[in-house]
Every structure is written in structure tokens, then in C-alpha cells.
Image (cartoon, rainbow, N blue to C red):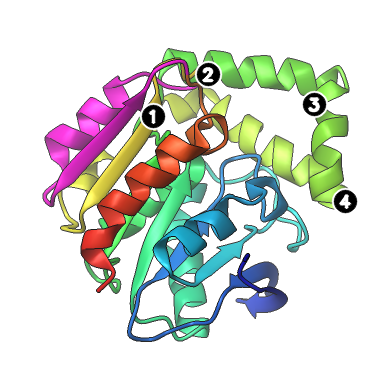
Amino acid sequence: MSLAAIDKVVTISGVRIETRIIGDFDPQKPLLIFLHEGLGCIELWHDFPGLLCERLGLAGLVYSRAGYGGSSPCQLPRPLDYMEREAEDVLPQLIEHFGISRFILVGHSDGASIALIYSGCVELPPPEAVIAMAPHVFCEDISIEGIAAAKSAYESGHLKRKLERFHGVNIEYAFRGWSDAWLDPQFRKWNIEKFLSSGTAPILVIQGRNDSFGTTAQIEAIENSVAGPFEKLLLNDCGHNPWQENPQDVLCRIAEFASHYIQ
């Protein structure tokens, strides 16, 4: 039986943020906080958050960042440190707004990078654990090539029509905010490895071996830098969306990992 979900719009620093609460908050247990990819939003997670919450017996919080889904539009162009700003400013305010004391961060792509940045901010309340799916900690050629290909697909109309169903009036903010930042020549310098050695939260990294936006060099950089416990799952015949392409393997591995941190 699926857990009940309640949609709620909250205001953070004057910005409307759409959220979805899955299940009932239990202060004695950690809450799963889901952080979406660069073109994602609440709806684009599909049923994965609910399935993971059910598997672990935990409540969840899913939200769409500004410029995505049903949240407020964002300023364009996005600043090149938009992931750092999300981790250091918006996410802590959401955690405080909902009175969350224990939590596990579950991020995909940009969301995984945001989770890793947050975990490395020692002045913020630490997560119990971090699950980072297809994370980026620095910019690679393959990332730029993948995003350039996505831009071509968007401008041809196919990708725009697909995404417009989920982002509505935010479609240009969602796509241009992401693609224009990554394709800015200055973004080649972007690197968040400095955050990895600061946090001590256990980290599970999941990546497909056929990821068209990043190589296993990302995982190696994380493994070589983190201060806390580290685990990884590399999936064969899997691309950039492991939670969607290999849901059962991903759900099982996350459940096994997180079970040590939910008591």
C-alpha cells in the first residue's frame, strides 16, 4: 500500500517552493530529502521517492527548486555557483521550516552535487547519510558534450515538448538556467571537491557505467577525498538515471546502505 502524499507550497526567502510530503514525519527517525537533477522537479521523480520511503519505512520530503515545476521562476542567467547557493542557503531554510532534526539526503545529478556540498558545510546540521546518484564534483568534457546535445534536442522542439508537461511556464527557466550555466566557458573551473573532506556523513555513490554526462572519475574523486564512510555501486548497462533505469537494484542497495543509519 503506497504512503499518503501531501503537496504544499511554502515560501523561502520570498520564493514559492512546491513540496511533497510522503508519509508521516517521525522525529525519532530520519526523513528522506530528495534533491532533483538539473532538469527535474517533483513530478519527474515519478514514483521513486514513494517506493524508497516504503522500502525504508521512512517519511520523505520532495521539492522543486526555484525555476522548476510549480515553484517560483528563478533569475536568469543562473549564477555559476547555483548548486553551492542551493546547498548553503535554500536547503537549510527548508530543513528549518519543516523542523527536521534527522535526515538523509537523496540526490540525483545536480541534486547529488547539492547533497555533497551540503554534507561538507560543517556549520550546518549534518545529515545522517548521503545517497548521491550520478553526482558531479567537477566539470568534464563528456558533461559539456551531453548538455550541448540536450540543448540541440531542446531547440529542435522534441525535448522542450517533453519537459513542458512537467515545468509549464517555468520551462525556459528550467532548461536555460541549467544548460546556459554548464555551457558557460567559465563553468569549466567549477569544482566542489573542497567540500568532500569536510563532512563525515556516510556516503553511497551510485553511477551507471554508460553515463553520458560523467565518467567514473567523479566517483574516484569522491572516494579519494571523503572523510567519512564511503560505498559505491557501479551499474552495467545503465546511463545517467540509475534510479529510473535500474530501480530494483538501486532500491535494494540504498535500503541496505541506509538501514545502518535509520535507528
Q: Is residue 185 visible?
A: yes
Q: Secondary structure at mark 2?
A: helix
Residue to which mark 3 is pinned? 159
Q: Are marks 4 and 2 in contact (CB under 8 Å)?
A: no
Determine whether 183 is above or below 53 in the image: above
Q: What residue is drawn where x is 50% and y is 31%?
A: 246
Front residue of this view, candidates 74 and 238 = 238
Residue to which mark 4 is pinned? 169
Task: Indicate the position of residue 101 as horizontal and vertical percent values.
Answer: 35, 81
Front residue of this view, candidates 69 and 16 = 69
Q: Is residue 14 visible?
A: no
Residue to which mark 2 is pinned? 144
* Residue count near mark 1 (Cα–Cα under 10 Å), binned few <14, some 14–19, many ≥20: many
Q: What residue is drawn where x is 25% and y is 56%?
A: 120
Q: Considering only order in the chain, which callout, 4 or 1, is on the residue closer to the N terminus?
A: 4
Identify residue type, mark 2: Ile
In magenta segment, residue 228:
yes
Residue to which mark 1 is pinned? 207
Q: Depth-wise, is mark 2 or mark 1 nearer the camera? A: 1
In magenta segment, residue 108:
no
Q: What's the CA distance linking mark 2 and mark 1?
A: 18 Å
Label tally: 4
Quarter of the image where one finds residue 14? bottom right
Q: Secondary structure at mark 1?
A: strand
Task: Indicate the position of residue 226 as horizontal and vertical percent values.
Answer: 16, 44
Q: Which residues are magenta?
A: 213-237
